[in-house]
């Protein structure tokens, strides 16, 4: 286990380097000038050139690149051109809200997907299967921003049950304000999770040990919950890990819909303002997050299922 984790961490280095390099190159190729965007349309060419020099944007491409990599190694992403503070401080301020939204979304996704999958597998009812298919097909066809807007109108504006934006001031208000955005993000990964869990449950129900249990008089529903779900749960863990990319993308989009002061709104502001350092830092941080989740998923998978040997 230890050797496997060390090997995977070493493999993270070229992946993160690739993500960082791609982000840097794309920012360099992007149209616009951070200095000109910061100073406005009335700025003189001399003022723009002076600010570019202060920010180091007039240096050669390779020098900027290696300075970026050097800062990345020590965790220094440089200053934010627009927010007039270090990028690291911005990340400390904005990332907690995004991570909290992702956690709430996972909880909602599990709370929605497991009962539906159990209902379909345990009852073997055509009605349950049809309802599940309609639900997954409908949800899968709706983008996260549309679901978020719909929830705002139905459960926020019309009923007043939930706040339509903001993040609150304490943990209780944070969680309360994340209910609607959490559901919106969760629904983006529910279709895959429901289909995978349902298929895994049906596969388990066709195995010899579950057939033996039912032949001894155990009902189908109890066989599902007591036996089949154990193996299906392993599949669910794997699917959740694979869906982390969709989770990140959904969270970044929904944050802007609900005006949550997280990394999503920061990314949007930074892209529009050509704040290269912030965009590059967020890209690298989320790249590292995705790789770490994949690693954690593998570890949990091996612990839950002793048949899996990570060292193989």
Image (cartoon, rainbow, N blue to C red):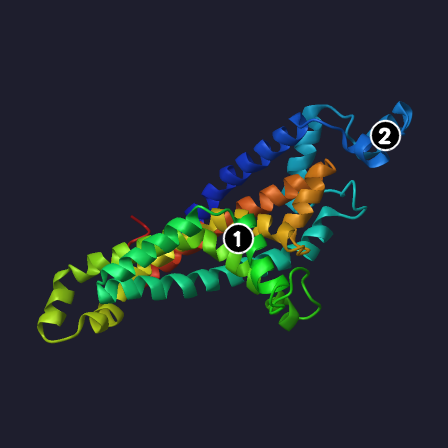
Please identify the quadrant where the N terminus is shown.
Answer: bottom left
- The answer, for residue 214, to whether it is visible in the render is yes
Distance in Å between CA atoms under marks 2 and 1: 37 Å
Q: Is residue 35 above or below residue 72?
A: above
Query: Residue drawn at (58%, 53%), measured in percent from left and top?
Result: 149
Q: Is residue 143 above or below residue 60?
A: below
Query: Residue drawn at (19%, 70%), measured in percent from left and top?
Result: 220
Viewer-proximal residue among 219 and 46: 219
* Residue of label 1: 147
Question: Quadrant of residue 122 in the image?
Answer: bottom left
Q: Residue 289, percent across and down? A: 53, 50
Question: Quadrant of residue 2 in the image?
Answer: bottom left
Q: Is residue 158 above or below residue 192?
A: below
Query: Residue drawn at (67%, 62%), measured in percent from left and top?
Result: 167
* Residue of label 2: 41
Camera-nearest label, 2 or 1: 1
- The answer, for residue 238, to whether it is visible in the render is no
Viewer-proximal residue among 293 and 168: 168
């Amino acid at each position: 286990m230890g050797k496997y984790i060390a090997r995977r961490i070493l493999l993270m280095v070229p992946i993160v380097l690739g993500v960082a390099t791609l982000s840097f190159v794309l920012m360099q190729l992007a149209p616009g000038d951070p200095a000109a965007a910061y100073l406005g349309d009335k700025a003189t060419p001399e003022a723009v050139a002076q600010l570019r020099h202060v920010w180091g944007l007039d240096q050669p491409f390779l020098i900027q690149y290696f300075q970026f990599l050097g800062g990345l190694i020590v965790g220094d992403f440089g200053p934010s051109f627009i927010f007039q503070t270090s990028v690291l401080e911005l990340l400390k301020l904005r990332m907690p809200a995004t991570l909290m939204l992702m956690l709430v979304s996972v909880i909602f996704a599990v709370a929605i997907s497991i009962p539906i999958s159990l209902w379909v597998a345990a009852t073997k009812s055509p009605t349950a299967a049809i309802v599940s298919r309609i639900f997954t097909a409908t949800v899968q066809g709706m983008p996260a921003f549309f679901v978020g807007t719909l929830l705002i109108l139905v459960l926020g504006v019309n009923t007043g049950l939930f706040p339509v934006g903001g993040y609150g001031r304490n943990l209780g208000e944070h969680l309360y304000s994340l209910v609607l955005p959490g559901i919106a993000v969760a629904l983006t990964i529910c279709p895959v999770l429901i289909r995978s869990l349902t298929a895994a449950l049906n596969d388990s129900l066709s195995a010899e040990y579950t057939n033996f249990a039912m032949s001894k008089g155990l009902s189908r529903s109890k066989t599902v919950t007591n036996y089949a779900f154990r193996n299906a749960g392993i599949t669910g863990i794997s699917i959740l890990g694979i869906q982390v990319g969709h989770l990140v993308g959904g969270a970044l989009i929904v944050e802007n819909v609900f005006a949550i002061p997280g990394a999503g709104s920061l990314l949007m502001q930074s892209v529009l303002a050509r704040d290269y350092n912030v965009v590059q830092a967020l890209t690298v941080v989320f790249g590292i997050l995705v790789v770490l989740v994949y690693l954690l998923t593998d570890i949990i998978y091996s612990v839950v299922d002793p048949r899996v040997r990570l060292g193989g």
